[in-house]
């Protein structure tokens, strides 16, 4: 495999291979070294966790990093994304990490260039590195996926995290259900919707999603969202004893989750962030060594 563009591209065996590599990196504290390799990070949408965890992952692997933004590249002069990627590869990039807003365009580009590409989020499409770090967090907690009940809660329609995680979790044996405002449901992802109260009481993993205001035609009201659809302190008390809270972040405290729960004992939100570096190291190494 040359690229990682979608969770649907990865077989179950390849997913487990990446999880096990991440586990080995973490347990042994050592990792492969790729000096004289250049990673081009091209982020055309805002990012804190994904962009910077890729940067740290690349540096830990001994790589040099080319940091490219839309505002300081020739994209502002009308250059196509394809020509930008082709240029970065031509001048020496060994790998391109790309976040941008168009669903599916990276596959077209990947088919035309030789440089490996990792999709760091494409609009409402896919976010494979986020999905893999989420899977790794669940894998660490429960040792596997068979029979684990996962509730994905929030702005399903506009979430590439929901789209990436749902089917991957089901393939690996988890039972996945969703809770959302009716207008944010998406039958192309699932028709298995419950109320927030039902979902919270059933789940081993409550995976909350941010309201994707930037993808809505009209700004969504968030003042009353927590009580109606979010994880309140009262709902958290009804969760299973060993259930955990997850969120891809950024977290809007007091909107999708009560602020007091972000760092509660059952929260794994910051664990996810930490795992993001490790799983991205595993992904980069697998592509550079052509091990997938």
Image (tube, grey):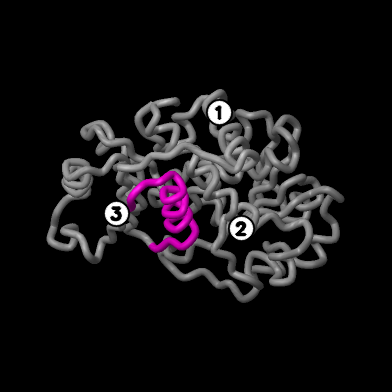
Residue hosting label 2: 181
Residue 149 drawn at (x, y percent)? 74, 40
Label 1 or label 2, whichever comes before in sequence order: 1
Cα distance between the residues tagged 3 and 1? 28 Å
- Judged left or right of residue 116, residue 175 is right
Which is more foreground, mark 3 or mark 2? 3
Marks 3 and 2 sit apart, C-alpha to C-alpha, by 41 Å
Magenta-span inclusion, residue 264: no
Residue 222 makes an appearance in the image:
yes
Q: Quadrant of the C terminus?
A: top left
Front position in the image: 252 or 3: 3
Q: Earlier in the sequence, mark 3 or mark 1?
A: 1
Query: Residue 67's spot in the image, x, y percent?
Result: 31, 57
Identify residue for label 3: 66
Where does the image place residue 21, in percent across and percent down from the top left?
Answer: 56, 33
Residue 172 bears which disc, if any? none
Q: Secondary structure at mark 2?
A: loop
Q: Which residue is mark 1?
A: 17
Which residue occupies 29% across, 40% down? 94
Looking at the image, which is closer to me, 249 or 67?
67
Q: Residue at x 54, y 49 (%)?
A: 276
Please name whichever residue, 183 or 119, is drawn nearer the observer in this view of the structure: 119
**Magenta residues (range):** 46-66
Q: Quadrant of the N terminus?
A: top left
């Amino acid at each position: 495999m040359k690229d990682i563009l979608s969770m649907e591209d990865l077989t179950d065996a390849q997913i487990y291979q990446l999880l096990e590599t991440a586990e080995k990196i973490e347990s042994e504290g050592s990792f492969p070294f790729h000096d004289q390799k250049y990673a081009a990070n091209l982020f055309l949408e805002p990012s804190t966790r994904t962009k910077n965890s890729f940067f740290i992952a690349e540096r830990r692997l001994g790589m040099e990093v080319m940091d490219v933004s839309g505002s300081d590249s020739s994209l502002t002069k009308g250059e196509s994304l394809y020509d930008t990627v082709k240029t970065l590869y031509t001048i020496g990039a060994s790998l391109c990490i790309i976040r941008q807003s168009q669903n599916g365009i990276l596959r077209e580009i990947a088919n035309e260039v030789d440089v490996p590409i990792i999709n760091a989020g494409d609009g409402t499409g896919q976010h494979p590195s986020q999905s893999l770090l989420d899977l790794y967090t669940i894998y660490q907690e429960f040792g596997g996926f068979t029979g684990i009940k996962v509730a994905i809660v929030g702005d399903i329609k506009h979430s590439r995290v929901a789209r990436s995680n749902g089917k991957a979790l089901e393939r690996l044996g988890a039972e996945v259900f969703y809770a959302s405002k009716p207008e944010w449901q998406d039958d192309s992802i699932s028709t298995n919707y419950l109320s927030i109260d039902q979902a919270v009481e059933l789940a081993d993993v409550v995976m909350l999603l941010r309201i994707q205001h930037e993808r809505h035609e009209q700004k969504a009201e968030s003042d009353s969202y927590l009580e109606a659809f979010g994880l309140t302190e009262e709902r958290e008390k009804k969760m299973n004893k060993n259930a955990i809270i997850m969120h891809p972040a950024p977290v809007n405290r007091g909107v999708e989750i009560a602020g007091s729960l972000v760092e509660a004992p059952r929260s794994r939100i910051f664990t996810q962030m930490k795992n993001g570096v490790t799983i991205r190291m595993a992904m980069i190494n697998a592509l550079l060594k052509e091990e997938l």
